[in-house]
Image (cartoon, grey):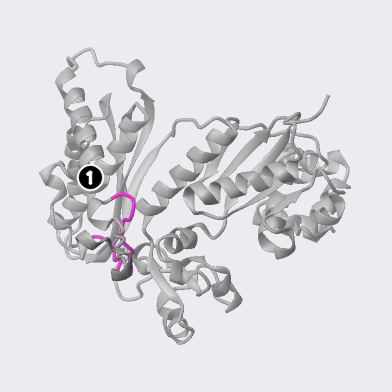
Amino acid sequence: MKKRIFALVDCNNFYVSCERLFNPKLAHRPVVVLSNNDGCIIARSNEAKALGINMGTPYFKAKNFLHRHRVKVFSSNYPLYGDLSRRVMTTLQQLEPEMEIYSIDEAFLRLPPDSGMNLNILGRQIRTTLKQHTGIPVSIGLGSTKTLAKIANRFAKKFPEYNGLLDLTAVDPDPFLNRCEINDVWGIGRGHAERLRARGVHTALDLTRRDDGWIRKQLTVTGLRTAMELRGISCISLEKEGKKKSISSSKSFGYQVETLNELREALATYITQAAVKLRLQQSTTGCLQVYLTTNRFSKTQTLYATRETINLAEPTANTGTLIKHGLERLQKIYRPGLRYQKCGVVLTNLVPAKSRQLNLFFKPDKRQSELMAAVDRINTRWGRHTIQHAAAGFTKPWQHRQEKKSPAYTTQWQDLPMVKASWPDSLLPDTFR
């Protein structure tokens, strides 16, 4: 019986690829993307990596270097990245229905053992189709387990000689495992990697050659499962996308906020965003946690970080109800005279909306759920914040900085790219001259 093959499809420099998709002039130019508030570098093109630009470098430290080397800098544009990710995943699912979305730019596929096609050819077809349908380049790693597919993908992406595709089922995997540092193995964290190196395990191949009992003692049963995967024994199956067990929403402010009114607006906005996610997965929440913090890196200001939790009398997904409880908790933890860097909300104790436990003393109001459904439909069709609670404010001056943000090419009508064309006079029919 033939084994099924796992494939890991990973978008190349995903955030950068999204920016380049609508600006072809950036094709061979170094490009970086910044985090929220234009803080740190979180994505780099290959040209930027070649310049020695490190991931996580603060923008203010690298600003002069980036300008000197003509590096194009973008603020993060998550609506654009999220929409293009959805298009990539939809295309993949049409090609291979057995799929696990692993992250915004990665997905595992399980290929049938008798596809009637050479795996190398199949992988090339997947890459070509994704490029044609979405414009996003990808690398693909093939292996008999998910862990081996992950390693194959790393080589396919890092080394040009593989041209974006490596099939470890068609070659001896040991040389590749010997070139894979132990800290680069999927499932081996930094602490475990240091412990293994101290005991003579430096590569993935070294780990496969250790005794099972020793591995289990050092890494528990999870580490043993990783070692079995490296040996070609599949222990980790594809996971279906499940509902989140908690939902959070927060961002650092564009400037340090002092007034309670601005904090109320920000918290109401974050609660609104969390509630939309909650209803999207058809859940309700029974617990709401609000937190507030000043700048923890400041050496001159008072450090203050606190949170307040409330258990709701009845699970709900109603934005207005959640805002009401959240603002009450914010009032309790707010301290005048401090300059706040961030606030946020976490929704926990999530239960399906259809099977929530009702309160004996409260009659459920069906109109509220219908109202939220109507609001969600309107905002989905006409754009985010078309209808919102007044408590969330309108101008939102405290929002995080995005001074170098590209247009929302695929999610805002006014940002759609415009194409202009003209005909030479010599080709025009006489009636149009």
Identity of the residue drawn at 77% across and 46% down: 218
How many numbered discs? Answer: 1
User: Is 65 on the left-hand or right-hand side of 37?
Assistant: right
Q: Is residue 74 above or below residue 61?
A: above
> Is any part of residue 347 visible from this angle?
yes
Quick one: which residue is furthest to the front in this view? 430
User: Is 12 on the left-hand or right-hand side of 123?
Assistant: left
| Residue 305: image location, x then y, percent | 33, 56
| Residue 404: image location, x then y, percent | 33, 69
Identity of the residue drawn at 13% across and 53% down: 394
**Foreground residue among 338 and 168:** 168
Q: Main secondary structure of the magenta part?
A: loop
Q: Is residue 66 above or below residue 49?
A: below
The question of residue 88 being in magenta is answered with no
Identity of the residue drawn at 62% across and 32% down: 238
| Residue 241: image location, x then y, percent | 51, 32
Amino acid bearing label 1: Gly
Residue under numbered circle 1: 383
Q: For residue 52, what is the image quadrant?
A: bottom right
User: Is 242 on the left-hand or right-hand side of 337?
Assistant: right
Label 1: how many residues lie within 10 Å, few (<14), some (14-19) or many (20+)? some
| Residue 105: image location, x then y, percent | 52, 49
Identity of the residue drawn at 40% across and 61% down: 22
Quick one: which residue is furthest to the top in this view? 360
| Range covered by the magenta-colored residues | 398-411
**Foreground residue among 329 and 52:** 52
> Is any part of residue 187 visible from this angle?
no
Quick one: which residue is furthest to the left in this view? 390
Question: Helix, strand or loop at disc 1?
Answer: loop
Q: For residue 34, what is the image quadrant?
A: bottom left
User: On the rendered image, what quadrant is the C terminus found in?
Assistant: bottom left
The question of residue 405 being in magenta is answered with yes
